[in-house]
Image (cartoon, grey):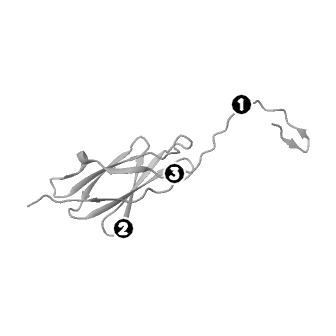
């Protein structure tokens, strides 16, 4: 490849060089509840564990963080950031008896990608 400019053409570049062009990450998939992390805590609250699979295009555009958003059962979304080496999250301090929805958004060096589909989990109570 050469570049043409007012003072003449550039030298030929070497063949075989590659450029990395990051692309917007796709949404994480396969959100699921992690049974071992779902429990009633001593203060009467509930904790819910979830996990997910990384975006399918992660190799073309490495994810550096995930934003976990959860709906508090009142159509109010709360955001939290996680590090890239995590594909799970435990949310604590939840009210028993409410259904919580979770969404995950991946972030690369450019921007946040598309959010996952909302995933609903019931914060159950212990039977009386």
Q: Mark 1 against mark 2, which lies toward the viewer?
A: 1
Label 2: element kind:
loop
Label 1: element kind:
loop
Quadrant in the picture for residue 20: top right
In the rendered structure, the answer to whether residue 14 lies left or right of residue 65 reads right
- The tag on residue 121 is none
Is 121 located above or below residue 90 in the figure? Answer: below
Which of pointers 1 and 2 lies earlier in the amino acid sequence? 1
Q: Position of residue 72 (x, y in %)?
A: 31, 64
Q: Position of residue 46 (x, y in %)?
A: 21, 56
- The tag on residue 26 is 3
Q: Residue furthest front?
A: 30
Label 3: element kind:
loop
Which of pointers 1 and 3 lies earlier in the amino acid sequence? 1
Q: How many marks?
A: 3
Instruction: Give the alpha-carbon distance from disc 3 to disc 2, as whole Å.
Output: 24 Å
- Residue pointed to by mark 1: 16
Instruction: Give the alpha-carbon distance from disc 1 to disc 3, as whole Å.
Output: 28 Å
Q: Residue at x 28, y 47 (%)?
A: 34
Asked if labels 2 and 3 touch by Cβ distance under 8 angstroms, the answer is no
Q: Residue furthest bottom?
A: 74
Q: Position of residue 68 (x, y in %)?
A: 39, 54
In the rendered structure, the answer to whether residue 81 lies left or right of residue 123 reads right
- Residue pointed to by mark 2: 76
Query: Quick one: label 3, few (<14), some, or many (20+) residues within 10 Å?
Result: many
Which of pointers 3 and 2 lies earlier in the amino acid sequence? 3
Q: Residue at x 20, y 62 (%)?
A: 96
Is 76 located above or below residue 56 in the figure? Answer: below
Q: Position of residue 27 (x, y in %)?
A: 48, 52
Q: Residue furthest left?
A: 128
Query: Quick one: label 2, few (<14), some, or many (20+) residues within 10 Å?
Result: few
């Amino acid at each position: 490849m050469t570049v043409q400019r007012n003072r003449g053409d550039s030298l030929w570049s070497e063949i075989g060089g590659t450029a990395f062009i990051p692309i917007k990450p796709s949404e994480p998939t396969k959100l699921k509840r992690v049974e071992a992390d779902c429990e009633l805590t001593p203060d009467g609250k509930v904790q819910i564990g979830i996990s997910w699979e990384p975006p399918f295009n992660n190799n073309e555009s490495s994810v550096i963080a995930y934003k976990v958003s959860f709906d508090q059962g009142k159509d109010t979304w709360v955001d939290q950031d996680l590090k890239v080496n995590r594909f799970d999250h435990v949310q604590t301090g939840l009210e028993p008896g409410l259904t919580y929805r979770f969404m995950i958004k991946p972030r690369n060096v450019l921007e946040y990608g598309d959010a996952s589909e909302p995933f609903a989990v019931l914060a159950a109570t212990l039977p009386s």
